[in-house]
Amino acid sequence: MIHHHIDQGRMAVGLPESFHLELSDLLHRRTLDGWHSMNANEFTIRLKEIAPSKVLLLDCDYGADEADRFIKSFECRRRSQPIGIESNGDSMLELLDKWDISHVEIGPIRFHAEPEKFDGHLEIGTIEGDRLVYRPDAKDYVLLDSQNLEHVMCDAAPNGDSLLDGLIQIADYFAKTAIDEIDIDDEDTGARTKNKCITAFGGSKYESFCTTALGF
């Protein structure tokens, strides 16, 4: 069992009733001119970079095999050839077309080896059984209730570029909690982390998705 699955149950981090997004806490790619959106290749590189080292994981009582599995959960695997997804400039769709991310685990988020089409949607993964989908008409990403696929549980991101930005923030958080670099009971750290994620995903409209993904 990988630790960041277990730890989510302990992440009862209380957030202030209101908080402001501080410029100093935003992503390192934030500039006064706006976001420099992460493309697919940048995402695969950055995701692998933030994985903790095996030495640090062993120091935090991970077993050797468990540490290896955790590190591999940050690795995207380049496909031998694209699978034919029309990305139309969407970085998430480009990632899915050229990379197999079925081994990637970001908190509770899991991805399919290949997207699954249904009812005009493109299901790219799941969060505890509920369906993370791309809606071609709206060109956005939402989380659908697995028990009622007509029910949008929450908006995930306005586009694939923002989705990748947010996923990196969540992955970075879980990587740091795994090696105790972040105290999951620290409310201030929790608030700052959530601020970063909300901003990365596209704003307050996506707060519910951040809560679902982070566990607080």
Image (tube, rainbow, N blue to C red):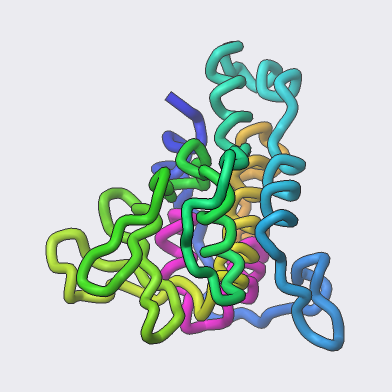
Determine if the magenta segment contains residue 195.
yes
Toward the left, the furthest residue is: 147
Farthest residue in the right direction? Answer: 32
- Rendered location of residue 89, percent (x, y): 61, 75
Which residue does the image show at 40% across and 76% down from the upper left?
Answer: 155
Magenta stretch contains residue 65? no
* Residue drawn at point x = 64 percent, y = 61 percent: 193
Q: Is residue 172 above or below residue 175?
A: below
Quadrant in which the N terminus is drawn: top left
Instruction: Give the x, y percent position of residue 43.
Output: 68, 55
Can the viewer see residue 76? no
Q: How many marks?
A: 0
Q: Residue at x 71, y 54 (%)?
A: 41
Residue occupying image coordinates x 39% and y 47%: 112
Give residue 147's position: percent from left, percent from top: 13, 61
Our reading of the magenta stretch's main secondary structure is helix
Q: Locate residue 33: give its quadrant.
A: bottom right
> From this viewpoint, is residue 212 visible?
yes
In the image: residue 157, left or right of residue 22? left
- What is the magenta range? 192-216
Q: Position of residue 151 (x, y in %)?
A: 20, 75
Quadrant housing residue 35: bottom right
Compare residues 98 and 210 and report the one nearer the observer: 98
Relative to 126, say whether 100 is above or below: above
